[in-house]
Amino acid sequence: MIKPVTFNARNIKKLVPFHIAEAKGINSDEAIHFFVSDIKLNAIKNRKYIPDVYYKAKAVLTPDFSLYLEADRDEWRRNVELNRKIGEWWQREGVTVIPSISWADETSFDFCFAGVGQGGIVAISSQGITRIDLFYRGVDEMVRRLRPKYIICYGTKVFLNYNVLYYQTFVEERFYGRSGQGWRRAKSTGR
């Protein structure tokens, strides 16, 4: 079980991709994320060490292994279990961990929210949403089951009725020339 963390998530100024944080370092008010391609995530699947930079970050989000709709349930389940296993390991070793939550469709709801404590901070990504209705249903179910204090949303603002902090993607940051959540700081007020 990944234990909930409950600090003020508004103190996270920026989300940095793990491979960039590992190569260049990170500030103590930044968090490390894994909302990257599965090809990049393969580099960490069998790691036996935790990079020092993870201890310096405000928090580290768990790896976001894809749950593609066209994949089978066994693959979805394996990817969720790997997300939790890695997060639990990092947490046991003293890293501040925020679980990344993802789902495929309603049939994945029975396991995709498992292994995460209630009342903490969780992270989701709005990148690559193919069915917004399914995304909203998943968010609603996640909130019902996990009752998060904050939801960190990496990517496009998708108007949720919850305490959501939006963060730009790496591409948006480079394109718009801004960083972090400053330009999207307000709590969303509806769909």
Image (cartoon, helix red, strand yellow):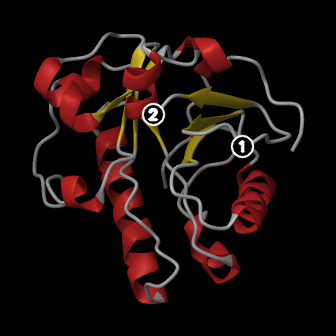
The label number, if any, that marks residue 16 in the structure image: none
Residue 110 is situated, as x and y percent measured from the top left of the image, at: 65, 77
Image height check: is 73 above or below 115?
below
Residue 177 visible somewhere in the drawing: yes
Badge 2: how crowded within 10 Å, few (<14), some, or many (20+)? many
The label number, if any, that marks residue 158 in the structure image: 1
Which residue is pictured at 21% across the width and 60% down the height?
A: 39
- Amino acid, disc 1: Val
Where is residue 83, by image quadrant? Answer: bottom left
Which residue is pictured at 26% across the width and 36% down the height?
A: 18
Q: Is residue 191 left or right of residue 122?
A: right
Q: Residue furthest front?
A: 175
Where is residue 159, by image quadrant? Answer: top right
Residue 153 is situated, as x and y percent measured from the top left of the image, at: 60, 38
Residue beneath disc 2: 169
Q: Nearer the viewer, residue 186 or 120?
A: 186
